[in-house]
Amino acid sequence: MKLYISADIEGSASIMDWDEALPGGSKFPYFTEIMTKEVAAACVGAQKAGYDVTVKDAHCTGRNIDPEGIPEEVTLLRGWTGNMLEMMGGLDEDEYDAVAFTGYHSDAWSDGNTLSHTMVRKVNKFTLNGKPASEFVINAYIAAYFNKPVVFLSGDEEICKVAKEMIPGITTVSSKSFVGAAAKTKHPTTVRREIQEGMEKALTGDYKTKCAVDLPEHFVAEVEYKEWPEANKYSNYPGAKRSGLKSISFESSDYVEVLRFIMFCL
């Protein structure tokens, strides 16, 4: 049995500022260690449930996780494949039984995290079929496209709520919540313990049915940028049209084409 994990950092324990989340930031090395330890905890939980694990380092450069900080038997995919799967790169390279997410965060149109964004920081809002869509939603639909259940997510409290609404059977672990612009955090050790236990639990029982993701038959994607010149530029993407001063939209019944739009316009 095989598990695919997509790992981000902005939903990891305690992190709340871009100085902590991006290369060159004074606190970045510490929080990549936090990210690595959370990924390792997820891997251990999956291994206890009898799974082989592949981890996609899905933050920024794709080179954040310390390879020696995760279990020896785990396969780590570093860097970017360059195809439309982006944060889910490599999912199409093997027959995985399930998909999981660690360190995920709220979408750009949310106050659930001071690091809330969707793919890039120049985007003010991204919606699919009229609803704000996070990186989790985009990637859960990728899992659905390949008929893979999504069994687990760790991240901020708001993205955990979104995941539960979308997939009622998913197991979630909240790392923190926010009081205004202040993070109310759990101890990182507590979060790691809950991730390990939660992952093992998530992979036990009939998750294939209760954690299946419904893929819509048709998609209307809309991007609202922070600056109007971005909308002017990206409205030239084939099939896209200007939908507002700072926004463009794109429609397709093929989710691969939606991913292509996201790749070039976000």
Image: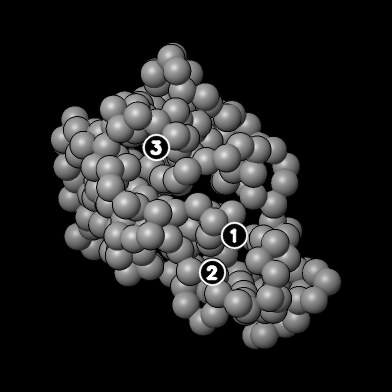
Image quarter hosting the N terminus: top left
Question: Measuring 16% from the left and 35% from the top, which residue is drawn there?
Answer: 190
Residue holding disc 2: 215
In this rendered view, identify the residue nearer to me: 186 or 53.
53
Three-letter amino acid code at disc 2? Leu
Contact (Cβ within 8 Å) of mark 3 with mark 1: no
Q: Nearer the viewer, mark 3 or mark 1?
A: 1
Looking at the image, is mark 1 or mark 2 earlier in the sequence? Answer: 1
Looking at the image, is mark 2 or mark 3 earlier in the sequence? Answer: 3
Q: What's the CA distance linking mark 3 and mark 1?
A: 33 Å
- Element type at mark 1: helix
Q: Residues within 10 Å of mark 2 (few under 14, many from 20)?
A: some
Contact (Cβ within 8 Å) of mark 2 with mark 3: no
In the visual, does 202 lie left or right of 26?
left
Looking at the image, is mark 3 or mark 1 earlier in the sequence? Answer: 3
Contact (Cβ within 8 Å) of mark 1 with mark 2: yes
Residue holding disc 3: 20
Residue holding disc 1: 145
**Image location of residue 194, percent across then percent down:** 20, 39
